[in-house]
Amino acid sequence: MASWTYQAKGLSVAFVSLTDAIPGVFIDALNRIELVITGDFDAAALALERRRGDAIGEVWALAPLQLVGEAHNSLRGRVDRLVPWWIDGTIIKFGNPRIP
């Protein structure tokens, strides 16, 4: 989760969590919540179904690159965007690894 990137753009960020195991940030100006889901995507999907009624706006899920297929299968229709992340050396990267 890259709260610092939003803060660098002057946006306010609040730390939230979907469950104890799923941390996230809420970006008020974008009406968006970004969640970091590293496993048990079925449990995350159930938690999202319970929370979607809370009118939390857009939901983005960040998942490890190697688990994106599993995340997609479980979270389809429950999140607005699925963003892969991976570590390259000491740098955390987000998005499509094939785009330089």
Image (tube, rainbow, N blue to C red):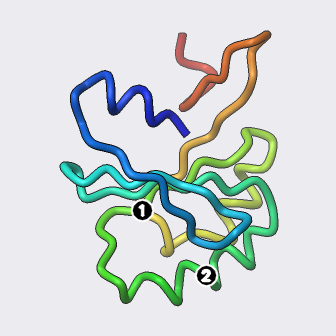
What is the three-letter code of the residue carrying label 1? Answer: Val
- For disc 2, the marked residue is 47
**Can you give x and y, in whole percent of width and height, for residue 93 in the image?**
61, 23
87 on left or right of 76: right
Instruction: Determine the image quadrant of residue 90.
Output: top right
Identity of the residue drawn at 57% across and 70% down: 18
Q: Label 1 to label 2, Cα distance in Å?
A: 12 Å
Tell me, for residue 42, which label it has, or none: none
Count of numbered marks: 2
Specify few, some or many for label 2: CA neighbours under 10 Å numbering under 14, 14-19, or 20 or more.
some
| Three-letter residue code for mark 2 | Ala
Horizontal relation, residue 98 to residue 65: left or right:
left
Where residue 98 sits in the image (x, y, percent)?
Answer: 61, 20
Q: Nearer the viewer, residue 27 or 58?
A: 27
From the image, tell me which residue sits under label 1: 59
| Picture layout, residue 11 above or below residue 55 | above
For numbered disc 1, what is the local secondary structure?
A: strand
Q: Work out which quarter of the rendered image holds the C terminus and state it.
A: top right
The residue drawn where x is 73% and y is 68% is 41
Q: Quadrant of the N terminus?
A: top right
Q: Residue at x 25, y 25 (%)?
A: 9
Given residues 90 and 97, the one toward you in this image is: 90
* x then y, percent, for residue 53: 37, 89
Q: Is residue 30 left or right of residue 90?
A: left
Is residue 95 among what the camera can see? Answer: yes
